[in-house]
Amino acid sequence: MNVYEQYKQKLRTPEQAVQAVKSGDWVDYTTNICFPPLLDAALAARRDELLDVKIRGNLTFGPIQVAECDPTRKHFIYNTWHCSGYERALADKGLCNYIPMLFRNNSWYYENFLTVNVAMMAVPPMDRHGYFNLSCATGVAAAILKKADIVILEVNEHLPRIQGLFGECIHVSEVDMVVEGEHAPLPEFPVAPATEEDRAIAANLIPHIRDGATVQLGIGAMPNVVGAMLADSDVKDLGMHTELCGDAYQLLYEAGKLTNKKKTLYPGKGLTGIVFGSKALYDWVQDNPAVAVAPLSYVNDPAVISQNRDMISVNNCIAVDLYGQISSESAGLRHISGTGGQLDYVTGAQAAPGGKAFICMTSSFVDKKGVRHSRILPHFGGDIITTPRTQAFWVVTENGAVNLAGASTWERAERLISIAHPEFREELEYAAKEQKIWL
């Protein structure tokens, strides 16, 4: 039987395919734009037939119909490895739970600890050899599909095929069911316009990035500002090694700054695990030999990251306390995002020859009532710690950049207060004295 005959034999409607799900099952949707909307809608339509079906997603942008159709959560319980803005709103309503995870451990968790009764994901159309490319979800998908008892693929005609190092494909012979149907164009994710503070933070960071550096840029406005400013700078021959390939990299490529020529690991190729952003980004990664995807168990392994000379990691955080603890995933007990790969890259970049890891934030923020608050705090009281103080390196605000590596508690307090918002420096000094970490 050739691959096209196998494909036809496995073809189902979404409604037929989701009959595979039973009460009590664990179902996986993989991640981001490889979310399967046709299967999700068909599964939601079975709500009253099912109880206690647990679903895992990750950076899903919605709508997730199984979550929205069941506010009681008696039928469907949605969980995520990392909250998108949409999933954060679900969490605020009690309709989404977070699964703590370092992204490098994703495959290990599935291989050793997790049950997957049914895996569902969207993929580009099958190639002539019978392979489905795992596209923008390659970083996490292979381990999920391998662990699943039943694999259902939803063919999305808009998804890009992305070349890979390994783990980027699944053969039709390994698939149980295939679903077809029309899809809306891929969602795009405009980044919020940069503020003056964002540009000041980027300006404090860019002098540390040398010609030939390999760069990891996280999610959000700040990494995109860094990318835009690097595109206008004199820096040359940058490389890409990142869990997430976003629009900043396409911008750097178009500006002639991203060549990957000087990389010590896979020279000539930018390495990533997942991709989402604009249509221009999806067009750029489509069958591009200069871009390669691989599982995050490899891409985010600090031992792999550290093989890149002059590795630069740039990530955001929500707050830092005077001890150097960094919170990037919660505001108090309110869940915001997730650990993701921040600690992976902080660890890997610090271990790389000439490497540096930067955590960026504005020094303060103004709440809905117009009250200003410091992001540098005396100490945390319930916030989730993403990067422990033992691994804190460079912290950057619009007021400067300070290195905490090897610094004592009083040195950390002194350095962090120096980049705090001026309005809060006196009270932070007082708190440091009370906490006996001030000279």
Image (cartoon, rainbow, N blue to C red):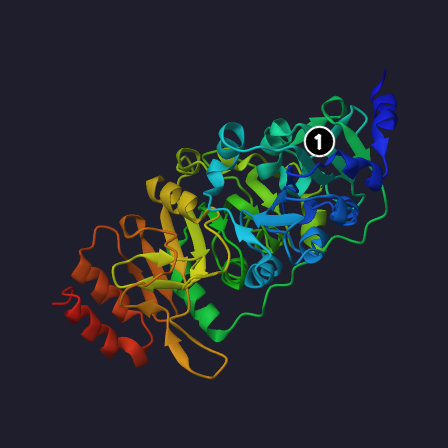
The residue at the point 16 percent across, 70 percent down is 434
For disc 1, the neighbor class at 10 Å (few under 14, some 14 to 19, many from 20) is: many
The quadrant where residue 303 appears? top left
Residue 377: x, y in percent?
A: 31, 68
Residue 260: x, y in percent?
A: 53, 41
In the picture of the structure, the residue carrying the numbered disc 1 is: 151
Q: Which is nearer the eye, 83 or 157?
A: 83
Q: Decide if residue 272 is on the left or right side of residue 381.
A: right
Toward the bottom, the furthest residue is: 370
Toward the left, the furthest residue is: 439
The residue at the point 49 percent across, 28 percent down is 112
Q: Decide if residue 116 is on the left or right side of residue 101.
A: right
The quadrant where residue 148 appears? top right
Q: Amino acid at mark 1?
A: Val
- The reply to whether residue 125 is in sight is no
Placement of 402 over or under 264, stated as above or below: below
Q: Which is nearer the eye, 156 or 354?
A: 156
Q: Secondary structure at mark 1?
A: strand
Placement of 127 over or under 434, stated as above or below: above
The quadrant where residue 144 appears? top right
The residue at the point 50 percent across, 80 percent down is 368
Residue 367: x, y in percent?
A: 46, 78
Q: Which is nearer the eye, 295 or 162?
A: 295
Q: Which is nearer the eye, 108 or 342?
A: 108
Q: Decide if residue 16 is on the left or right side of residue 73.
A: right
Screen quadrant of the N terminus: top right
